[in-house]
Amino acid sequence: MSDDTEVHLEARLAEQDEFEPPESFVEQANVTDPGIEDEFEDNWPEAWERAADLLDWETDYDEVLVDDNEPFYEWFVGGELNASANCLDRHLDDRGDEPAIEWIGELGETRTYTYEELHREVNEFAAALRDQGVTEDDVVAMYMPMIPELPIAMLACARIGAPHAVVFAGFSADALAERMNASDSEHLVTVDGYYRRGDPLDHLSKAREGREQVDGDVTTVVVDRLGEESPADVAGGEHVYGDLVEEHAGATVEPVTRDAEDMLFLMYTSGTTGKPKGVKHTTGGYLSYVTWTSHAVLDVKPEDTYWCSADIGWITGHSYIVYGPLALGTTSVMYEGTPDYPDKDRLWEIVDDYDVTQLYTAPTAIRAFMKWGPEYPDRHDLSSLRLLGTVGEPINPRAWKWYYRHIGNEECPIVDTWWQTETGGMMITTLPALNTMKPGSAGPPLPGISADVIDPSGDPVEAGRAGHLVVNKPWPGMLRTLYKNDERFINEYWDEYSNPERDQWVYFPEDGAKIDDDGYITVLGRVDDVLNVSGHRLGTMEIESATVGVEGVAEAAVVGGDHEIKGEAVYAYVITEDGQEESEAFREEIIAAVEDAIGPIARPEQVIFTPELPKTRSGKIMRRLLEDIANGDELGNTSTLRNPDVVHDIQQKVSSE
Ligand code: PRX
């Protein structure tokens, strides 16, 4: 392409703010009926049967929704099913020899599991878990990176009715222990280590350190990923995954019949307080919802090679690498490594090699690709792609357009999907064959989802104004409660805007948003003390408590500052105790403490020593001001501060870093 044409194209895209679904996509899409919106509206909640109908039920449900104990809604009540049977057994006749998982390792090694093979290994591991004493309703913790044994262990648990609680491998030993204790988990599946940028990384020592802090005995299964290169050997009392599977070779385990409302898994996520929230998802509602949204939004078909590049340790991987795609019998790609190893074209090489049809990734990744330049995707044939998706954080129009043009060749619709750990699956997004796309705006709520943007008194805001995002009606994939904490569940999500007098329960996701005249919602970011770093959700309170735990720290405040690639970065403002030197070594000590308590993802971008924190007269830290300082923005009103002079001092420190 000549430079002139290139410039012309860029200019045209820069001006365009609405994009229609590409014709070639519409012709083959799963959902093309424009009446679907009305159908959900006119026939709510029964219209949700179309999600449940995508699954095989052992016993039909009697009622779609039971709402006589709000907000403890129940979906597909009376129905019985098994998630592992839905993801595996029912595909064996038609798709047994087709790949279920295409795994690509960090070192370039690959493994393909057909549905038949995946079914076999899930059965064998389910039998092994039973042998270890895991029974129905026991919570099994998993602390593993992106290796096939993770989805295998999840499906094995689902098969025997034992909920899993997966802890992201990048989290620290302390974080693992906290989640295992909170979920009463006495079983752990982990790995000896994994590779990062070609080097073996010890994981087992971290897992052991976490396990030691768990109350009671823990049975441990260790996957041998590194073989000879493993820095830690499996010790007495720990079981090797490979041995267990071999011992149970050929075993079959009948899928346990689960009630629709039985727990499928727990997923811990960050909230306003220092304690992570144990989000509970169920078998019938969750599985129906992620299967339906994979079908309707990601346009997944069995013959596709679909790739979600998230980590299974987060909700995106649960819903859209494992449960949704496998329930639909498609091929799900799993990549262990990073996008720039061995080179910055790694993702595009995989798309090319595997003829990937859909790519679902995070805006952070897209911003990095943009920075690296189009020469990397240009090295490869990406014409197999049919749809692109993003999730986890707002995507700015420039990044959206770059993705649309350089990855999708202007032939793939983009779905910008807003949702959360708590919602189980996508909530606000365009339907790829039906809705106009507006870069920067996620889109309308999905059919059947009722969302709005409201002001502090609970009234809808005018178009274009910012307010709080709320969801007005329940949906099948919603969390049912926070594990063993119904009270916190109500306080965190329902209390703020619900009005029992009007008999209306309103879910508050703690996001700010605006809405336009067409009902398109632009999500602006969290309104609570939660940060979104590279699409990863982190609680400022958790980081603060790790910081103040360091000897020599008197007080700390943690806020998010804008970051070109990561979206947000962690800024820690620290007051040292008298006599504590404000040295580089002490700064490193604080950073190490945060990494120990949470993990490297929470690593502060800057640690700023300050003699005071800006506080209101009532003693509340003005975080907004600290954010403005981190961003180098003009400061708002500082007249309500008890100590206005400190602001200038801190500003100078940040700008000189
Ligand atoms: O602030 C929103 C942001 O991510 C939060 C949810 O984080 P988590 O529970 O970890 O789940 C992430 C993957 C679903 C939301 O409260 N968020 C997620 N998707 C978007 C988004 N913000 C803007 N646009 C999105 N598409």
Image (cartoon, helix red, strand yellow):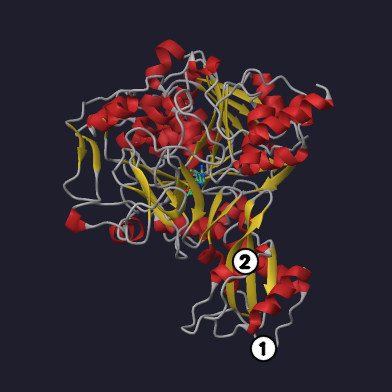
- The image position of residue 148, as x and y in percent, is 56, 32
Choose between 349 and 264: the one closer to the eye.
349
Q: Residue at x 56, y 28 (%)?
A: 19
Q: Which amino acid does label 1 sit on?
A: Asp
Please give the residue where the numbered disc 2 appears in the rendered image: 628
Quadrant where the C terminus is found in the figure: bottom right
Choose between 2 and 630: the one closer to the eye.
2
Q: Is mark 1 on a helix, strand or loop?
A: loop
Quadrant where the N terminus is found in the figure: top right
Q: Quadrant of residue 40?
A: top left
Q: In this view of the protein, can residue 217 be seen by the observer?
A: no
Q: Residue at x 60, y 54 (%)?
A: 206
Q: Identify the mark nearer the N-term, 1 or 2.
A: 1
Choose between 431 and 465: the one closer to the eye.
465
Q: Quadrant of residue 184?
A: bottom left
- The image position of residue 152, as x and y in percent, is 49, 32
Query: What is the crowding at mark 2: few (fewer than 14 residues within 10 Å), some, or many (at least 20)?
Result: some
Tag of residue 578: 1
Q: What residue type is labelled 2?
A: Asp
User: Does residue 42 sit above or below 185 in this rendering?
Assistant: above
Q: Which residue is drawn at 43% across and 41% down?
A: 517
Q: Is mark 2 on a helix, strand or loop?
A: helix
